[in-house]
Image (cartoon, rainbow, N blue to C red):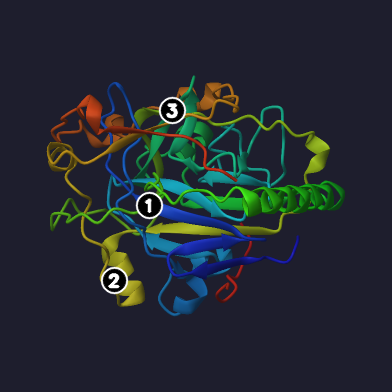
Amino acid sequence: MAVNEARIEGDTLLLGDGVRVRFMRTLRLPEKGTHGLPPGLGTFPLRRVEDHADTVPERWRAKGGVMMPVYLREAMWLSFGGSAEPTALQVGVGKVCAISGKKWTGRLDRRPQNYVVLPRQPWLDGINSGEGTVRQFVAVPLGMGATVEGQVTGEETVGGLQLQAFPLAPGPRAAWREEQRRLAEERARFLTTNPPPFAPAPMGYGAPMAMAAPAGGPPAAGAAMGVGAGGTMRQEVYRDDRPAGDWSATPEARVFVHLVTPPEWRRITGEEPPPSPADRAAYTRAGLPWYDYDDPDGTDLAPSDTLAGVKPVGEWLGDDLDPWTPPAPHQTKHLGPPSPPPGAPIADGDW
């Protein structure tokens, strides 16, 4: 295994050579219908497991990684940023691939593709379960059968999320960097004689939005949490258009992300967890934005047949009783692809 180059910087996870992953709090979607992209309502806090070795469960110490607090049925999405250098990123939910639906192998595969390509994939909100759609990542306790892991494997022994980043192989990486250097020189020469007018940058989907959340919320049972499937939203998972041999066979970094209930977060870290999730009906009534995203040059992957069969968490936890107010057409903001100092290392373990 390669030396693990995973670190935390604030509430951002750094993987390898500049990949930045933020775990975003968001509004949980209804489990019926197909919806636009919900907003980012700030980041989940992250802490290294090894910094709390005396209070975390022993099995967590063996896996290493990081932990974050989530409420029962709280939704999340993964925001990708940082370096523009191409990276193949694997995303697992209970060691089930969120892209292919296959069991986690730790190796890149194209039949079917079991990773997303950064920076083309700006974020991932859920499992690849439909044509041009995903089903939202939603936190649920282990032991009920509600997780993706439980439905795909028949067991719930892993939980959490798993990430692994692969860089380009040395030859393609050097060629990519040289091409970027050439393009940067051409751009600099053009801007010398054609300075752009000033315009403020629009706030992207990944930008956290300040919003008060109601206190309280339903309690979560037990410390071990996994990922289930929530509502359906319009989002493509893009096909890799590079030759398979362009990628390194060795990952630069990997990390296990443990999901912990708010009471356990308080016990383990001594810190207060974030407030309970925001009220989605109040959010929409306030006229705040939802989003849509389109990359005209990207090609959507075929959905996983396995993940398409995963049932929503409401099948186990009961109907979603939160009121749903669809956003007005003017509330949906249409987004497209943008123009083109680390902290302490995170310990890896056996998972």
Image coordinates for residue 49, horizontal then vertical, percent: 49, 70
Q: Is residue 335 above or below residue 219?
A: above
For image coordinates 41% across by 49% down, the residue present is 199
Choose mark 3 or mark 1, whichever is in front: 1
Of the pair 324 and 41, the residue shown nearer to us: 41
Query: In which image quadrant can residue 34 be found?
Result: top left
Element under label 3?
loop
How far apart are the alpha carbons under marks 3 and 1? 30 Å
Residues marked 2 and 1 touching at CB (< 8 Å): no
- In this image, 278 relative to 346: left or right? left
Residue 73: x %, y % from top left? 28, 44
Q: Amino acid at mark 3?
A: Val
Residue 12 lies left or right of residue 223; in this view the side is: right
Q: Which mark is residue 310?
A: 3
The quadrant in which residue 45 appears is bottom left
Disc 1 marks a residue whose amino acid type is Ala
**Does label 3 or label 1 sit earlier along the sequence?**
1
Q: Is residue 107 above or below residue 336?
A: below
